[in-house]
Image (spheres, grey):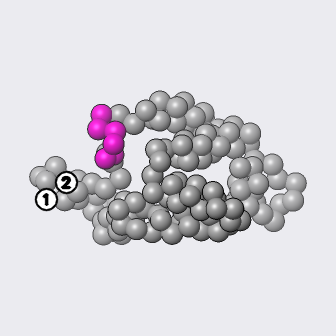
Amino acid sequence: TENLLMMLDRLTESEYRPHPRLAKALDVLFILHAEHEMNCSTAAVRHLASTGVDPYSAVAGGIGALYGPSHGGANEAVVRMLEEIGSVDRIPEFLEQVKARKRKLMGFGHRVYHTKDPRARIIRRHVDEVFAIL
């Protein structure tokens, strides 16, 4: 994770070391994301890996599974919604339409966790630490 943070942020600085708490928080997010049910992409990676293919091929298969609108499509729906809103000054109008049930607010809620995502408690602890650093 530290290497990923370095590549994302300071690739040209060879002596750069990311803050250890930021790296730990990202590690936790990656683990919680990976350990989230046996969804389509996870099943695809595991199934492909069980045949002995190289890790790159297995992960490519998982990424391919994310492309479908019934799996990773939810993320795309959020991006489309944000593009449609367009600017900060249009947020109040959009939220009023959501409250009137004329629009859907994408990215909130979960098809399995109808009350609260159990990962939220763990993530919250790390988020508070990250914001204290930033």
Q: How many marks?
A: 2
Whether the residues at callouts 1 and 2 have beta carbons within 8 Å, the answer is yes
Q: Which residue appears at 60% of the width and 43% of the height?
A: 31
User: Looking at the image, which residue is at 30% across and 34% down?
Assistant: 115
Q: Which residue is mark 1?
A: 102
- Identify which residue, 116 or 105, lies in the foreground: 116
Q: Secondary structure at mark 2?
A: helix
- The secondary structure type at the circle numbered 1 is loop
Amino acid type for the residue under numbered disc 2 = Val
**Residue at the spot x=59%, y=47% of the render?**
30
Q: Is residue 130 visible?
A: yes
- Image location (x, y in percent) of residue 23: 69, 44
Say which residue appears at 31% left-offset and 56% top-offset: 106
- Secondary structure that dominates the magenta span: loop
The answer to whether residue 56 is above or below residue 113 is below
Tell whether 21 sits left or right of 83.
right
Q: Which residues are magenta?
A: 110-115
Residue picked out by circle 2: 98
Instruction: Judge whether 102 appears above or below 68 on screen.
Output: above
Circle 1: is it few (<14), some (14-19), or many (20+) Cα within 10 Å? few
Left or right: residue 59 compared with residue 79: right
Q: What x and y, as percent, mark residue 71?
A: 40, 60
Counting from the top left corner in percent of width and height, residue 53 is at 68, 65
Q: Is residue 3 left or right of residue 116?
A: right
Residue 34: image x %, image y %?
Answer: 56, 47
Q: Quadrant of residue 27?
A: top right
Q: Amino acid at mark 1?
A: Lys
